[in-house]
Amino acid sequence: MKQRDVNASGPSDFRFELARWSIFAILILTYILVYFHRMAPGVVSEYLMADFSISGARLGSLAAVYFAVYAVMQIPSGVIADTLGTRTSIIFGNLVAGTGSILFGLAPGFEIALAGRFLVGLGVSVVFIAIMKNNAVWFHEKVFGIMSGLTLFFGNLGGVLAAGPLAQVLTVFQWRTVFTGIGSLSLILALAGFLIVKNKPQDMGFDPPNTYGGSLDIHTRHWVTNLKSVAMTLEVWPGFWVQLGMIGSSYAFMGLWGIRYLQDVHELSRGASANLMTAQLLSFALGALFWGWISDRIGRRKPFLIAAAAAFLVSWPMLMFLPWTTGISGYVLFAFMGFAASGFVITFAAAKEIVHPNLSGMGVSMVNTGCFVGTALAQPLVGYIADLTWDGTLAAGVRVYSAGDYQNGFIAMIILCILSLIAAFRVRETYCRNSFKE
């Protein structure tokens, strides 16, 4: 094995940096598409309701199936990342997601569209955990927080692209063309993953950046035993509930109902609504980078997580009751919501730091499941609650909901946020160090 001198700038060091950042680039390009699929239904919701003749509840279900399969796949994703490695996850994830996106774009009816979204969710469900595993094995543990923030930052650029830019693209191309094109790009990234991605530095002859003591060799144990050891670590679970409430409500708003709310209640155009959502998504991306950096910099996890959860809880009454306008005050409010919600990124570092280092994929996946369970519940829940009080108003065959309809749904989001704040107080402080004890 080639020894890499981290204090010198030589050919071996250059090859190591080139390798890990090339791999990271392929993973990040894939993750950008993950977020695009996650947020795009909010912009194309009007087309989906019209083309498939569906209600708000069915629209919520079409968007939420992505999150439902994502949630179910989180634990298997952690097992795959820890056993088969990042390379397998990225190759097959892109293949399945690409096929699903093309099917969604070509769907003649609701059922086929639902099947396409299912395949998209299945394919992309393995990507984030694979990236977290890659960050854990290719980068030093002292920068895991900032690498998590960097990952979320770039991933959220896909969410940004699925807001204002997508709204502009839809003035030229049909929504079906967009999704078939994105699916084709996923297939190209599957090939790139096959050619470039490696599971760990040792596969290319380099020493790993992290070494850990201890006599426990997790590779001699069955993966079920390893998974059980992670699941039985009770301190992992508060992060699950933080994500369920905090990100479940955030993604339900950013990824589906936010634009419909702005169109129905504030009578904004799709483009103007998408611009406000772009501000929220961009702030979410920058906030993820900030929270990861400040947490690593100060050497604390818990205080920043509590602050972010509290701020996001407060943002919902601000949205519902403050006299904000669609001008500067609206942009500030939506940016504040995105920035506060992005503090959830700290839960990944906290989870990774309380389980065995070689089981970081399972630890992160356990926490990340909460995000998608929450979103899968929240997206159709808002639609269901809005349908209960809907007065029958239609515009071009699409249901139009009142401010009261949306506020009833948003109260459910506030309850989820209260849950996340309570859970944040239960998260264990790791002081940015792996604290696993056999």
Image: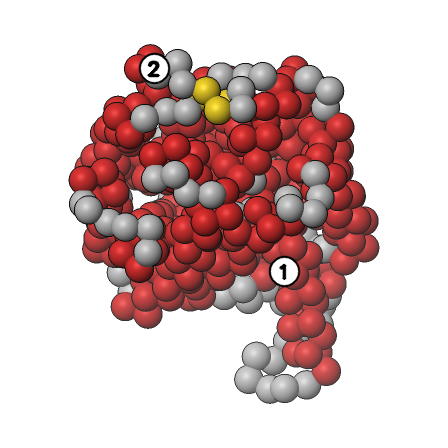
| Residue matched to label 2 | 391
Q: How is the image coloured?
A: secondary structure
| Residue 79 in sight in this render | no
Q: Earlier in the sequence, mark 1 or mark 2?
A: 1
Counting from the top left corner in percent of width and height, residue 187 is at: 78, 43
**Would you say 198 lies left or right of 40 here?**
right
Where is the C terminus found, in terms of image quarters?
top left
The kind of residue on which mark 2 rests is Asp
Callout 1: helix, strand or loop? helix
Mark 2: secondary structure: loop
Give the label on residue 389, or none.
none
| Corner quadrant of residue 366 | top left
Residue 172 visible in the picture = yes
73 or 273: nearer the viewer: 273
User: For this rendering, which residue is in front, 326 or 106?
Assistant: 326
Left or right: where does residue 331 sit relative to residue 224?
left
Question: Tag on residue 24?
Answer: 1
Whether residue 304 sits left or right of residue 261 in the image: it is left
At 71% across and 74% down in the image, what residue appears? 15
- Up the image or down, 59 lies above or below 306; here it is above
